[in-house]
């Protein structure tokens, strides 16, 4: 069981842990419990790091394990009518930052919990408070270094 220990320091709260796939899913489930409408979460890490896997587990923890959570690689956004409502963005294929206004980002920020893969594609469009979930490779097979930075 992974404990989502948030360590306060330098104005940021940081949790860092080497996690298996199962532990990452548990961490996502626990993290989801902290979130409220208006929270924005930047998902950071390379292709295949586990960003979508983390968001999928977070969504399924409130929508039910049967909820199909596709990667928004091509649709750029998927929405979930959950409590709280969830917007899941993958901006990898975004060409112009202005495009995300058409993808309902303002509605997402005001009405739901918003997970964003490839947030750097937004440019300067959003400068507000956000969590960062950072996934890095681990020297242990099928593990990831999971870092959670709170706003
Ligand atoms: N500890 C782990 N945490 C997250 N994903 C893992 C882990 N170990 C193996 N994986 C696998 O790595 C892949 C991550 O893919 P995905 O979540 O789509 O990455 P991303 O969205 O960052 O491109 C999945 O196939 C997942 O099963
Ligand atoms: Mg992804």
Image (tube, grey):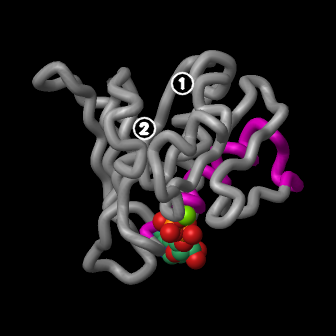
Residue 30 at what x, y percent from top left? 56, 37
Q: Which residue is mark 2?
A: 4
Residue toward you, 104 or 52? 104
Q: Quadrant of the C terminus?
A: top left
Residue 98 at what x, y percent from top left? 50, 40
Does residue 113 show up?
yes
Residue toward you, 5 or 47? 47
Residue 9 at what x, y percent from top left? 15, 25
Q: Does the segment drawn in magenta span residue 57?
A: yes
Q: Residues within 10 Å of mark 1 (few under 14, many from 20)?
A: few
Q: Which residue is mark 1?
A: 34
Q: Does the segment drawn in magenta span residue 77?
A: no
Q: First in sequence, mark 2 or 1: give its number.
A: 2
Report the residue at 40% width, 32% height from top.
125
Q: Magenta stretch?
A: 49-67
Residue 63 picture quarter: top right
What is the total number of numbered labels drawn onto the structure image? Answer: 2
Report the residue at 70% width, 44% height from top.
59
Q: Residues within 10 Å of mark 2 (few under 14, many from 20)?
A: some
The answer to whether mark 2 is within 8 Å of ligand 1 is no
Find out whether the residues at labels 2 and 1 contact each other: C-beta distance under 8 Å.
Answer: yes
**In the rendered image, the vertical position of residue 118 relative to residue 127, given as above or below:** below
Residue 7 at what x, y percent from top left? 25, 29
What is the magenta segment's predominant secondary structure?
A: helix
Ligand 2 in which quarter: bottom right
Does residue 23 show up?
no
Mark 2 and mark 1: Cα distance apart in space: 10 Å
């Amino acid at each position: 069981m992974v404990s989502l220990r948030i360590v306060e320091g330098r104005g940021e709260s940081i949790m860092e842990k080497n996690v298996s796939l199962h532990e990452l899913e548990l961490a996502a489930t626990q993290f989801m419990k902290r979130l409220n409408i208006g929270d924005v979460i930047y998902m950071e890490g390379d292709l295949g790091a586990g960003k979508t896997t983390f968001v999928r587990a977070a969504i399924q923890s409130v929508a039910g394990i049967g909820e199909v959570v596709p990667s928004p690689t091509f649709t750029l956004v998927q929405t979930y009518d959950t409590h709280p409502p969830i917007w899941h963005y993958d901006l990898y294929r975004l060409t112009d930052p202005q495009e995300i206004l058409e993808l309902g980002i303002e509605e997402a920020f005001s009405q739901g919990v918003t997970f964003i893969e490839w947030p750097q594609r937004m440019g300067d469009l959003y400068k507000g408070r956000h969590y960062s979930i950072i996934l890095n490779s681990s020297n242990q097979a099928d593990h990831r270094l999971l870092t959670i930075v709170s706003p």
